[in-house]
């Protein structure tokens, strides 16, 4: 629409110009070399316009004749380039389709028609890789690295080839060159960072991370820097405690939920008498990520405290996140150290129905320390063997007893506090020890009465498999002269009698036969 309006305006201006000239007639006289020409103004203007058009036509023809060799050459070059691009296109499609023969033929054709073309070099390198010709691929990548516009692509290819032949030195040099040429290049910066971490060069790793800062998200950069600072602090804690303290405090600011950083910062601050500041850091970390290492550092905030003072401190820490298993274990551990066994049992009571290994093991310690009951200790230890596992530091299928900054596969911050094999959904043991088969009740005769009774031990908690058996037991006929001992029948996961919810038990009667008490005890664990 705008173009139509402009065209109409132009036509109107031209018409107005002609009308203006027609309304003002005049004569034009030219005298040159003895010739005298007189004509009107309109005719002179038209003649000048015609001469200009003729001059332009003559100039165009002459220029076309003069430039014809160049145009012919340009035509053939363009045609050759088009054939080269078509060959490159066919080759790339053949590589994607897995047609090696067509890819190599197209690469040769493209090299003949378009030598030095970036896409031709890429096609040659990929076809060589597809054919297993690593030497040809490296030559193509080397040639690409010589050109400014394909340098990064060539370096990337050389880096991959170096990794394939396990040439760590060459891969490191190529990655460093690429990172120097383009600091924001993610793969190059990550390669340099991984190399520094593998060499435990934490200062170099921090420098590499700073160079690739623009290629990372803000949260990712802060987390990685916190992990590297924590690793550096752990390496320096026996060399330069002041530098280690400064590094770990910066790590806590960057990632308050990083457990190793918070625990180490709490220990370093406690050593220098800054218990209040350490308590603030540990409390914040506990609220974000309750962990045994944080609890241990919190328990040792003040050197020389009594066991009861540590118990009080642990109870205040657990109250910040009520209902957490880690809090209950922390309180129970401190209570055992303070010999407050009732407090320890009360803390673990909500988790005794389905205990984890740590809960069952701690209950065994409580039974041994408080009562010295070897039977109950064995029961809890047996239950610990069949109980669900606890979270551990795990990465790449490897379990570590402590946190490490780099996983076995070289991933920074690869270790996580979680259940082993959680990625495949296995959180409980798949092999269970079958429960012992129940034996029929045997009637016994009390010394003061002739009525036979059956001695049955009441379990600590109501168990579904035992209840029907208890109801079915009735007084039986008088047994043989040899008195028998009735074994305790309980479920595989039951800790046995007196598990903290003790009930009244009928005492067992000592056997008069040849079976010894130790043999009967061993039968309980079959």
Image: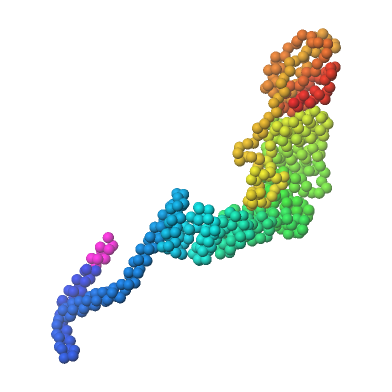
Counting the numbered discs, the total is 0
In the shown orientation, is residue 121 left or right of residue 27?
A: right
Please tell me which residue lies in front, 33 or 324. 33
Quadrant of the frame with the C terminus: top right
Please identify the quarter of the rendering in which residue 188 is found. bottom right
Q: Image height check: is 480 above or below 305?
A: above
* Residue at 65 percent of width and 32 percent of height: 430
Q: Where does the image place residue 498, in percent across and percent down from the top left?
A: 77, 26
Q: Let me know if residue 6 is in the magenta part.
A: yes
Q: Is residue 220 above or below residue 43?
A: above
Q: Is residue 278 left or right of residue 481?
A: left
Q: How is the image coloured?
A: rainbow
Residue 501 sits in which quadrant? top right
Q: Which residues are magenta?
A: 1-9
Asked if residue 221 can be seen in this view, the reply is: no
Image-based side of 519 in relation to 222, left or right: right
Residue 238 at least partly seen: yes
- Quick check: is 295 in the magenta stretch? no
Prevailing SS of the magenta stretch? helix
Q: Is residue 108 above or below residue 62?
A: above
């Amino acid at each position: 629409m705008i173009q139509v309006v402009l065209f109409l305006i132009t036509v109107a201006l031209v018409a107005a110009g002609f009308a203006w000239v027609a309304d003002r007639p005049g004569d034009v006289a030219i005298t040159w070399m003895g010739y005298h020409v007189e004509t009107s103004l309109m005719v002179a203007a038209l003649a000048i316009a015609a001469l200009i058009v003729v001059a332009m036509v003559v100039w165009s023809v002459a220029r076309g004749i003069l430039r014809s060799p160049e145009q012919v050459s340009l035509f053939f070059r363009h045609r050759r380039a088009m054939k080269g691009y078509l060959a490159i296109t066919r080759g790339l499609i053949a590589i994607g389709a897995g047609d090696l023969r067509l890819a190599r033929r197209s690469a040769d054709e493209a090299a003949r028609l378009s030598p030095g073309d970036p896409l031709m070099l890429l096609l040659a390198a990929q076809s060589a890789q597809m054919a297993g010709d690593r030497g040809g691929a490296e030559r193509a990548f080397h040639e690409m690295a010589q050109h400014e516009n394909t340098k990064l692509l060539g370096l990337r290819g050389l880096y991959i080839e170096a990794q394939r032949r396990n040439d760590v030195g060459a891969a490191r040099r190529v990655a460093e060159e690429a990172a120097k040429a383009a600091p924001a290049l993610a793969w190059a910066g990550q390669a340099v960072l991984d190399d520094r971490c593998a060499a435990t060069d934490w200062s170099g790793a921090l420098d590499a991370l700073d160079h690739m800062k623009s290629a990372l998200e803000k949260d990712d950069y802060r987390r990685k820097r916190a992990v590297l600072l924590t690793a550096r602090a752990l390496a320096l804690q026996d060399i330069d405690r002041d530098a280690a303290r400064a590094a770990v405090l910066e790590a806590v600011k960057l990632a308050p939920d990083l457990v190793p950083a918070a625990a180490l910062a709490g220990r370093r601050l406690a050593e220098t008498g800054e218990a209040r500041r350490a308590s603030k850091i540990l409390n914040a970390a506990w609220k974000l990520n309750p962990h045994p290492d944080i609890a241990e550092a919190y328990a040792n905030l003040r050197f020389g405290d009594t066991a009861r003072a540590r118990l009080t401190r642990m109870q205040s820490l657990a109250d910040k996140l009520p209902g957490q298993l880690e809090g209950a274990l922390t309180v129970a551990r401190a209570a055992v150290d303070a010999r407050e066994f009732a407090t320890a049992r009360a803390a673990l009571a909500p988790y005794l129905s389905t205990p984890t290994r740590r809960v069952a093991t701690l209950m065994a310690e409580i039974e041994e320390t408080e009562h010295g009951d070897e039977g109950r200790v064995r029961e809890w230890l047996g239950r610990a063997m069949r109980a669900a596992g606890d979270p551990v530091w795990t990465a790449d299928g490897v379990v570590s007893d402590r946190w490490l900054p780099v996983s076995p596969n070289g991933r920074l911050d690869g270790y996580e506090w979680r259940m082993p094999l959680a990625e495949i959904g296995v959180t409980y043991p798949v092999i269970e020890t079958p429960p012992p088969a129940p034996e029929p009740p045997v009637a016994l005769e009390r010394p003061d009465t002739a009525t036979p009774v059956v001695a049955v031990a009441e379990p600590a908690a109501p168990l579904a498999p035992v209840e029907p058996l208890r109801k079915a037991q009735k007084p039986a006929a008088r047994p043989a002269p040899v008195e028998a001992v009735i074994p305790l029948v309980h479920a595989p996961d039951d800790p046995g009698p007196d598990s903290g919810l003790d009930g009244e038990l009928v005492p067992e009667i000592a056997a008069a036969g040849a079976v010894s008490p130790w043999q009967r005890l061993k039968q309980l664990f079959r």
